[in-house]
Image (spheres, rainbow, N blue to C red):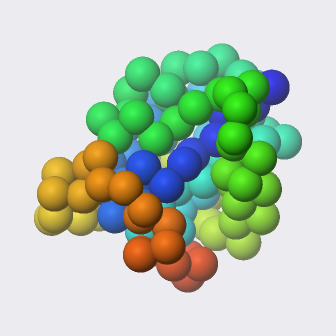
């Protein structure tokens, strides 16, 4: 089992999860984060820290797409190990919005640490 970041993170990217991760398995895209499933130790401390409720265990049904996306982009985006001040100004406006992947997803990397 591993945890995955879903589209609820897109345009929110609060990064509270990054602060508590004991193995630094988060990677930063331009407008969302990804978890490297090969590095995640399944501790679950990140899940309750996410204000957007974007982090879920991969054992929940229907998350195959997100496991693949996290696997792919965690190898392309830079590692991020601490919360920075890059939370979008309009993050709260996008929290809970439906269909964010199709509307806003960007494969571009973030800044990382």
Residue ID at (40%, 34%): 53
Which image quadrant: the N terminus? top right
In the figure, is residue 31 to the left or right of 62? left
Q: Is residue 53 above or below residue 7?
A: above
Q: Quadrant of residue 76?
A: bottom right
Residue 25 visible in image: no
**Image position of 89 (left or right of 95):** left
| Residue 2 % position (x, y) | 75, 31
Identify which residue is drawn at 49% across, 55% down. Answer: 7
Is residue 44 positioned above or below 111 on the image? above
Q: Position of residue 104 (x, y in %)?
A: 42, 75
Can you give x and y, in whole percent of width and height, for residue 60 in the image? 68, 27
Figure disc tally: 0
Taking the spot 66% from the left edge, 18% from the top edge, the residue there is: 43
Q: Looking at the image, is 97 positioned above or below residue 73? A: above
Residue 32 percent across, percent down from the top left: 47, 61
Residue 35 in view (yes/no): yes
Tell me where residue 85 sits by quadrant: bottom left
Out of 1 and 104, give the one closest to the viewer: 104
Question: Closer to the camera, 23 or 52?
Answer: 52
Q: Residue 65's image quarter?
A: bottom right
Going by the image, does 90 lie left or right of 12? left
Is the residue 106 above or below the residue 12 in the image? below
Q: Residue at x 24, y 58 (%)?
A: 94
């Amino acid at each position: 089992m591993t945890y995955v970041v879903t589209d609820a993170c897109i345009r929110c990217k609060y990064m509270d999860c990054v602060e508590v991760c004991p193995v630094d398995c988060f990677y930063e895209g331009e407008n969302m984060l990804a978890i490297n499933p090969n590095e995640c130790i399944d501790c679950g401390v990140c899940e309750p820290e996410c204000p957007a409720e974007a982090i879920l265990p991969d054992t929940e049904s229907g998350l195959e797409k997100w496991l693949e996306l996290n696997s792919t982009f965690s190898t392309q985006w830079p590692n991020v190990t601490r919360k920075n001040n890059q939370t979008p100004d309009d993050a709260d406006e996008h929290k809970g919005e439906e269909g964010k992947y199709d509307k806003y997803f960007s494969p571009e990397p973030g800044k990382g640490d």
